[in-house]
Image: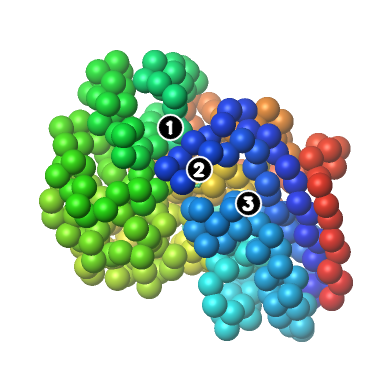
């Protein structure tokens, strides 16, 4: 398979409701899509970088720039390409994992469409549907939060994740527990909003029987996460801190976490995501599939990954309607709290041309 060219396409997708985290409020998802055209087939990849470098150092304009200037030329120069070759060719370029992941996914989609294989079977999925959790943003008031959670539970979500930050932590967690009971699978995500000095405060969350606390401290601080883990009975989960299998190995060795949120974009692609899954499974560390407000394209691949045997906790793999009134693919719809794993070749879904064109803000063709 040889690449003939790559299209960079920017789309603007209004969110059904603002999504507030400790690092900012999102009302519209600004997404960079990659379409790789090869001698055999075409493939799509979704870059999960956000418009500003607040979750991580990457951002959409930066991802587009590094792709057109360095990453795409390195790939179009290859006489033959497949998903593994992408990783090798891009390895010299430091960082920019979300940009690399989008390119690797697009090449993998093309490769799998050409060989009539699904993402799920290529990755080694062991299930045909995955249980779905939902990530609930910070709200203006507790009653609004309770309404939002009640709505999601009515839709069938099997696990609730509350975004927290200093000033929005114990009270919302207590309110959700009081209203929905002890059996509700409940967890929290701080997006690095605390410091180790907050350990006594965070330990008060231990009373609420949470599944886990996600990324309480700074992304680059595995040592302090290990210290915090010793002071909490709630299991500690890392998101931002884990950018590779090497980071996962270090975190496990140090005791920085007992659970990992695997996001393929954050770790440079589905192949590295699978390596992290394999490593964690061998260590008895649970993983679950995170999300970055993906459209149906990224969601299709995430659902395939979440069907691997080590993904033992429900992921942030929500239905399309949790994010978008109209998805660019056929929508992912919850069935009894689960999403079906796509079975068609490659991602198993593709953009609907009329919808895609309506949300497109720019396109750029980079020939080989
Ligand atoms: O920290 O998991 C996170 C969304 C954007 C950036 C970071 C995060 C999130 C979410 C939502 O929590 C996950 C999703 O539903 O896609
Ligand atoms: Mg997170």
Coordinates of residue 69 in the picture (x, y in percent): 74, 75
Q: Which residue is mark 2?
A: 24
Residue at image location 20% in from the left, 36% down from the top: 205
- The structure residue drawn at horizontal position 18% and vertical position 41%, both measured from the top left corner, is 201
Q: In this rendering, would 21 be left or right of 287?
A: right
Q: Earlier in the sequence, mark 3 or mark 2?
A: 2
Q: Are marks 1 and 2 in contact (CB under 8 Å)?
A: no
How packed mark 3 is, by other alpha carbons closer than 10 Å (few <14, some 14-19, many 20 or more), is some
Compare marks 3 and 1 and give the one earlier in the sequence.
3
Marked residue nearer the N-terminal end (1 or 2): 2
Please report the residue visible at 28 percent of the width from the left and 21 percent of the height from the top.
Answer: 175
Residue under the point 41% across and 57% down: 240
Q: Quadrant of the N terminus?
A: bottom right
Image-based side of 16 in relation to 205, left or right: right
Q: Which residue is mark 1?
A: 138
Q: Quadrant of residue 6?
A: bottom right
Asked whether the viewer can see residue 249, the reply is: yes
Residue 329 in picture, x, y percent from top left: 72, 39
Q: CA distance from mark 1 to mark 2?
A: 10 Å
The residue labelled by disc 3 is 51
Q: Report crowding for label 1: few under 14, some 14 to 19, many 20 or more residues within 10 A (C-alpha).
A: many
Q: Nearer the viewer, residue 57 or 234?
A: 57
Q: Please tell me whether mark 2 sits on a helix, a strand or a loop.
A: strand
Identify the secondary structure beneath mark 1.
Answer: loop
Q: CA distance from mark 3 to mark 2?
A: 11 Å
Q: Give the spatial CA distance, label 3 vs label 1.
A: 19 Å
User: Which residue is nearer to you in this view: 246 or 280?
Assistant: 246
Above/below status of 149 relative to 126: above
Which structural element holds mark 3?
loop
């Amino acid at each position: 398979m040889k690449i003939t060219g790559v299209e960079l396409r920017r789309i603007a997708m209004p969110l059904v409701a603002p999504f507030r985290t400790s690092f900012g409020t999102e009302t519209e998802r600004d997404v960079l899509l990659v379409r790789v055209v090869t001698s055999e087939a075409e493939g799509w990849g979704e870059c999960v970088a956000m418009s500003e470098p607040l979750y991580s150092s990457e951002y959409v304009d930066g991802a587009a720039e590094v792709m057109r200037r360095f990453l795409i030329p390195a790939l179009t120069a290859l006489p033959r390409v497949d998903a593994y070759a992408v990783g090798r060719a891009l390895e010299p370029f430091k960082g920019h994992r979300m940009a690399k992941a989008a390119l690797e996914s697009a090449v993998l989609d093309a490769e799998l469409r050409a060989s009539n294989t699904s993402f799920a079977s290529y990755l080694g999925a062991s299930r045909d549907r995955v249980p779905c959790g939902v990530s609930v943003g910070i709200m203006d008031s507790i009653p609004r939060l309770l309404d939002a959670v009640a709505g999601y539970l009515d839709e069938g979500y099997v696990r609730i994740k509350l975004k927290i930050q200093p000033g929005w932590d114990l009270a919302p967690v207590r309110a959700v527990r009081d209203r929905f009971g002890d059996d509700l699978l409940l967890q929290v995500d701080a997006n690095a909003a605390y410091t180790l000095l907050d350990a006594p405060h965070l330990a008060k969350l231990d009373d609420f029987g949470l599944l886990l606390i996600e990324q309480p401290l700074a992304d680059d601080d595995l040592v302090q996460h290990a210290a915090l883990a010793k002071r909490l009975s709630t299991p500690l989960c890392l998101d931002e801190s884990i950018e590779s299998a090497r980071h996962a190995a270090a975190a496990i060795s140090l005791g920085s976490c007992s659970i990992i949120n695997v996001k393929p974009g954050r770790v440079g692609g589905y192949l590295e995501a699978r390596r992290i899954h394999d490593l964690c499974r061998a260590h008895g560390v649970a993983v679950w599939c995170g999300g970055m407000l993906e459209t149906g394209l990224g969601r299709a691949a995430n659902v395939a990954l979440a069907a691997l045997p080590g993904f033992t906790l429900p992921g942030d793999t929500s239905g399309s309607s949790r994010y978008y009134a109209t998805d660019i693919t056929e929508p992912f719809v919850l069935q009894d709290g689960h999403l079906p794993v796509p079975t068609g070749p490659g991602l198993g879904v593709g953009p609907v041309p009329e919808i895609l064109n309506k949300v497109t803000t720019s396109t750029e063709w980079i020939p080989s």
